[in-house]
Image (tube, rainbow, N blue to C red):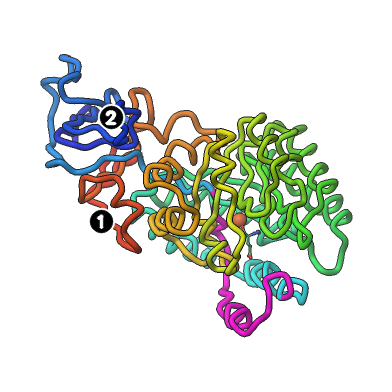
Amino acid sequence: MSECYVLTDARLAPMPVPDGQGYACDGVVVVEREQIAFAGAAKDLPDRFAQMPEQSLEGCLVTPGLIDCHTHLVYAGSRAREFEMRQTGASYEEIMNAGGGIFSTVEATRAATDEELLSGALQRLDRLIAEGVTTVEIKSGYGLDRETELTVLRTARALEQARPISIKTTFLGAHAYPKDTTADEYLKDICLPAMEVAAKEGLVDTVDGFCETVGFNPAQMKRVFDRACELGLPVKIHAEQLSDQGGAALAAGYKALSADHLEYIGDDGIAAMADADMVAVLLPGAFYALKETRKPPVQKLRDANVPIALATDSNPGSSPMTSLLLIMNMGATLFGLTPRECLEGVTINAAKALGLADRGKLEAGMRADLAVWDFNDPAELSYRIGDAPLKMRIFGGEIC
Ligand code: NIG
Ligand code: FE
């Protein structure tokens, strides 16, 4: 298609429209090179676009390209055996304390070749792309030694060359620590130096950590965040997934972009997140797979005006899945989010959770990352279960 083209007869969502439906009918999107030049009602289309090539979308829905803002997409191996153990009564923590869990994925990831890591990640990435995803965040954290952490981040970066996708990388060296050392020794000798090298090589966009009884305590997380700040990197946190460690409030002190999971967050944590303008990234895939019964406090997050994002948390242990549309359905059915909240959770709020101000909205000046769906009602996106009726995907203005 040409450098500038006009998509007509579209429905646009999410839009801040006064009728409260959350979408605009008879909408138009003008794509000019990599950006949206106009998005809105046909009657408001500026004259200068009137002669541009047009394509009618015949009433179909257009949303921003979807954003999966929390994944662990690069790893090797499978944890199906552990799934079987959990089915017969073992808990996630018990399996991890016995040397399984994250550690079994670390072993498989260290043993994999670069090609194996890349091809496994591509398979998972292709499933996200098939659902209209245009930006994916990918964490390290299955290396736990310097070389493998760097390899995982390089693999994540390489995905951007292999597919039409934006990748944002997160250093999650503080995911777990090897059994033959202590958390503090691991931070000093491996994790913090690896973060430094990764940052110098330009492999890191954000720094994350797993603040949990089976991960790192708040004092240890503080060391991770202090070093990230010295390196000028923004932070986020896996917090209050299995217990309330005060991780979200700690991260708020560092103006973190987001706190993720949050089933066990208390009122103080929510207030701190609101003050720091953080995003709550909810991960219903992990909630579901771990058969968690405590839900994140959605109404309290709403009351405090904390923006809510949703993500797959795609990983081999607690969320072995690659469907952001299924996550939208789970956000609605398991956590009680409205369809509009689910859509905002994988667009505008997911962009905010990654610190990205150039995407996630249908607005002039935003990146032209778009998904066109084979229906017209945005509620279909979270209503359907495991269905991906994507009609067209546009990445940086290119149809692909
Ligand atoms: O986001 N919470 C820690 N990390 C992952 C799980 C990792 C694993 O079990 O391999 C999560 O749920
Ligand atoms: Fe995670």
What whole-number distance in Å separates the C-alpha atoms at marks 2 and 1?
26 Å
Question: In this picture, which residue range is highlighted in magenta?
Answer: 70-94
Where is residue 192 drawn, in percent x and y? 79, 47
Amino acid type, residue under disc 2 in the picture: Asp
Amino acid type, residue under disc 1 in the picture: Pro
Where is residue 286 drawn, in percent x and y? 56, 62
Image-quadrant location for residue 92 = bottom right
Task: Say whether residue 266 is magenta.
Answer: no
Is 238 left or right of 341, judged from the image as shown? right
Callout 2: SS: loop
Counting every numbered tag in the picture gives 2
Label 1 environment density (alpha carbons within 10 Å; few <14, some 14–19, many ≥20): some
> Which residue is nearer to you in this view: 27 or 298?
298
The residue furthest bottom is 88
Image-quadrant location for residue 22 = top left
Indicate the quadrant containing the N terminus: top left, top right, bottom left or bottom right. top left
Indicate if the residue with disc 2 has its beta carbon within 8 Å of ligand 2: no
Where is residue 320 drawn, in percent x and y? 52, 67
Disc number at residue 140?
none
- The answer to whether any part of residue 33 appears in the image is yes
Where is residue 361 drawn, in percent x and y? 38, 32
Label 2 environment density (alpha carbons within 10 Å; few <14, some 14–19, many ≥20): few
Residue located at (38% from left, 28% from top)? 366
Residue under label 1 = 389
Pick whichever of labels 2 and 1 is earlier in the sequence: 2
Task: Say whether residue 79 is magenta.
Answer: yes
Residue under label 2 = 19
Q: Is residue 181 above or below residue 350?
A: below
